[in-house]
Image: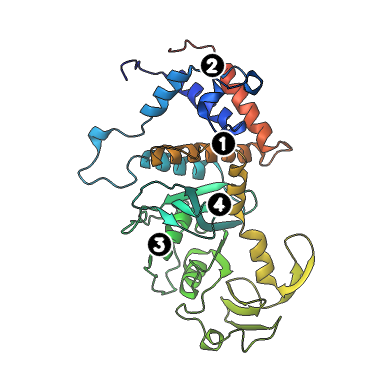
């Protein structure tokens, strides 16, 4: 720290470009980007962009909030909250997603000590920092996110929708106040009244929530369902592997909601506000399948978050070893920002460009603009 000199915006751009290079060419030992063990392993002239010692100093001092302005009882996420709020605002203002959007959890690997670390065995990371995310189903564009801060987590305030759409006053439905419903409200509220269809798994779905979104906020829903939810018909709650045959479908529907159970290898309960209880259709890979239409559509539309995570995993900007959790989360947010930028760049134009080509062009333009600035040694 005795060698510290104030940085500049140009130098911070070069710092970010180094992080981008590390995501394009992965090396386990960070020092070897500058000083490889063998000259054949040299990765360009990264030392011309930024000296190694200066890079380490900037990485150590990377900070996102002024500690002097923190409240008396700050949030657990206070260290990274300004970045999350800023990106949420930018992501949602620059792009309007297509009709199908998906809500699911994402997990950033973190094995260190952290009070709000979560374990999800179905995710690739298995343990780490959980976030609830709203993504476009087709492209994986991250439109809004909410980082989980552990027990007592407070969800965002419920504000009026961005386009001024008011809920229908003639329909009297008690809004569910459970935490999963609050997650859906917080992520989806700016899209109310715009004709979107939200796809969710059984962690979020319930008949009451689906009816509320359909009538009060003009938003359709579909997805898997837990049969022990409130207002699920009793005739469907008793359906098990013992009293259903392979391929059998049982359903109960009203004018606004359809709930069905389909017997595959296990009982698969589904809920939808716009599907009819019909069987047959085109599956995920273009084949015709004799399954309920809602299941086929769900399999196609639910993969938004998984697609985003898959695209990010090819360019691991978040290194496996980090001393501070919020710095690793910042790297993930930077990585997501680049992915979102590539989706916006190719949207609505005849620009067929791969994610890697976009990252290389972006890196080239950043270095072309900021590399010639005076460097701080």
> For the residues carrying marks 2 and 3, which lies nearer the camera in this image?
2
Q: Residue at x 36, y 34 (%)?
A: 64
Task: Return the residue nearer the eye: 348 or 322.
Answer: 322
Sequence order check: which comes first, mark 4 or mark 1? 4
> For the residues carrying marks 2 and 1, which lies nearer the camera in this image?
2
Please identify the residue farthest to the right as the structure is shown.
287
Disc 4: CA contacts within 10 A as few (<14), some (14-19) or many (>=20): many
Residue 9 visible in this rendered orientation of the protein: no
> For the residues carrying marks 3 and 1, which lies nearer the camera in this image?
1
Q: Position of residue 86 (x, y in %)?
A: 42, 39
* The disc label shown at residue 338, or none: 1
* The disc label shown at residue 47, or none: 2
Disc 1: CA contacts within 10 A as few (<14), some (14-19) or many (>=20): some
- Location of mark 3 (residue): 182
Secondary element at tag 2: helix
Structural distance between the alpha carbons of marks 2 and 1: 23 Å
- Location of mark 4 (residue): 135
Q: Is residue 233 above or below residue 171?
A: below
């Amino acid at each position: 720290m005795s060698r510290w000199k104030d940085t500049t915006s140009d130098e911070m751009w070069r710092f970010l470009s180094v992080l981008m290079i590390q995501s394009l060419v992965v090396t386990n030992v960070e020092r070897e980007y500058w000083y490889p063990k063998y000259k054949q392993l040299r990765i360009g002239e990264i030392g011309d962009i930024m000296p190694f010692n200066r890079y380490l100093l900037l990485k150590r001092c990377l900070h996102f909030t002024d500690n002097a302005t923190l409240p008396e009882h700050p949030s657990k996420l206070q260290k990274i909250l300004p970045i999350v709020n800023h990106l949420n605002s930018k992501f949602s203002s620059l792009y309007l997603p297509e009709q199908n959007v998906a809500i699911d959890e994402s997990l950033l690997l973190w094995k260190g000590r952290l009070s709000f670390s979560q374990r999800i065995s179905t995710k690739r990371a298995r343990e780490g920092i959980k976030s609830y995310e709203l993504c476009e189903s087709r492209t994986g564009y991250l439109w809004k996110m909410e980082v989980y801060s552990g027990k007592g987590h407070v969800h965002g305030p419920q504000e009026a929708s961005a386009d001024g759409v008011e809920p229908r006053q003639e329909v009297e439905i008690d809004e569910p106040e459970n935490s999963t419903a609050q997650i859906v409200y917080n992520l989806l509220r700016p899209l109310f009244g715009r004709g979107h269809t939200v796809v969710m798994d059984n962690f979020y779905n319930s008949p009451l929530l689906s009816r509320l979104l359909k009538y009060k906020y003009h938003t359709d829903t579909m997805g898997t369902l837990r049969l022990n939810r409130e207002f699920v018909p009793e005739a469907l709650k008793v359906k098990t592997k013992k009293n259903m045959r392979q391929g059998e479908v049982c359903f109960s529907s009203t004018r606004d909601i359809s709930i069905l159970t389909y017997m595959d290898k296990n009982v698969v309960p589904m809920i939808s506000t716009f599907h009819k209880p019909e069987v047959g259709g085109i599956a995920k890979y273009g084949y015709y399948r004799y399954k309920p239409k809602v299941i086929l559509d769900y399999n196609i539309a639910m993969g938004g978050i998984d697609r985003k995570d898959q695209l990010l995993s090819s360019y691991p900007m978040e290194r496996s070893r980090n001393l501070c959790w919020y710095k690793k989360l910042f790297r993930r947010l930077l990585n997501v920002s680049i992915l979102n930028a590539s989706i916006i760049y190719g949207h609505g134009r005849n620009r067929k460009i791969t994610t890697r080509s976009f990252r290389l062009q972006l890196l080239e333009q950043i270095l072309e603009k900021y590399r010639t600035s005076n460097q701080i040694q």
